[in-house]
Amino acid sequence: MKGRILRFNLYAGLLVFVMAAILLWLKTPFMKIWFYCFAWWSFILVMDSLNFRIRKTSPLSQSMKTFLYSTFISVFVWLVFELFNLRLANWHYHDLPLSAAERWLGYFIAYATVIPALSEISCFLEGFLAKKRPSFFRLEASPPFLKFCVFLGSLFLILTVAWPKLFFPLVWLCFIFLLEPLNYWLKNDTLLADLAKNDWTRMWSWMLAGLAAGFLWEFWNFFADSRWEYSLPYLDIWRVFQMPVFGYGGFIPFALEVFAFYQLFLWAKKKLDKNIPMKTAFFLILVIFYFGCFYLIDTCSLVR
């Protein structure tokens, strides 16, 4: 029964996407606001079904609880960058719903797609890349190298906050250098451990997933009425949809940052699974954090 549902998701996702596109073309007020969310969630259903059909495994088939956890944590991961944007002011939101409750629901549903979308695309790509094994060299994760990565990540973080107009691109790099060593020390899945074995498959799959997802983020945002728009200090040229062309390069390291964040939160999930009071507190703290960030987005990043 589970397999049939996962296979059926291909048709369900395609149907939802086609209906959403038709309603958008007809300029239905509801879909002009919510098209982005419908497009991404239907795409995730389609990709998960394709992964299950081709690879006999997919994020949804492995564990529904873990999949739902990934959607919840995905909101936190993106909100980290929204907080940086309060300083950077690289993007602003336009024509969002007037109701705060509807806006905040939209934030949550949209941000919840980040980890599932990248996971599904990378899973799909990894199935093809694993056969080719596109490796280059072995990178030894020695203690001095790990410490240097943390130093570099910290430096990038400081430069981003101190001189945002000059160093804003570094926000899409700093968490790779900060979180990959942490995950390595905690014995989580890491790209560093893969590279130590000269296995670049997962690295390439997530990098390409970032580029593919970035294109879709901008493509679907371009056609939606409720959207974001960019204002970059010195790279604001040659736009493809709303994004300046050089900005697409940022989606590649961003995907690696998302991977590192996700592995850290999977570690936290394992630690909290049997501790109900701590697990409850963990989720309550995140919910409060989400509400606080949504308020800040409304205050600083929303064009009314």
Image: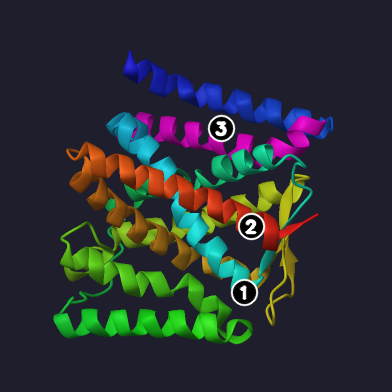
Type of the residue with mark 1: Leu
In contact (CB < 8 Å): disc 3 and disc 2: no
**Mark 2 or 1, closer to the camera:** 2
Give the spatial CA distance, label 1 vs label 3.
Answer: 32 Å
- Label at residue 247: none
Q: Residues within 10 Å of mark 2 (few under 14, many from 20)?
A: many
The majority secondary structure of the magenta stretch comes to helix
Q: Which residues are magenta?
A: 29-56
Residue 56 visible within the image: no
- Residue carrying label 1: 88
SS for callout 1: helix
Front residue of 27 and 179: 179
Give the spatial CA distance, label 3 vs label 2.
Answer: 26 Å
In contact (CB < 8 Å): disc 1 and disc 3: no
Give the image quarter of residue 165.
Answer: bottom right
- Tell me the residue at 20%/74% (across/down): 138
Q: Is residue 252 left or right of residue 1?
A: right
**Mark 3 or 2, closer to the camera:** 2
- Residue carrying label 2: 297
> Between disc 1 and disc 3, whose residue precedes?
3
- Residue carrying label 3: 42
* Picture layout, residue 175 above or below residue 57: below
Is 52 part of what is drawn in magenta? yes
The C terminus lies in quadrant: bottom right
SS for callout 2: helix
- Tell me the residue at 66%/71% (across/down): 89
- Tell me the residue at 27%/49% (across/down): 266
Residue 266 visible within the image: yes
Front residue of 115 and 300: 300
Is 6 part of what is drawn in magenta? no
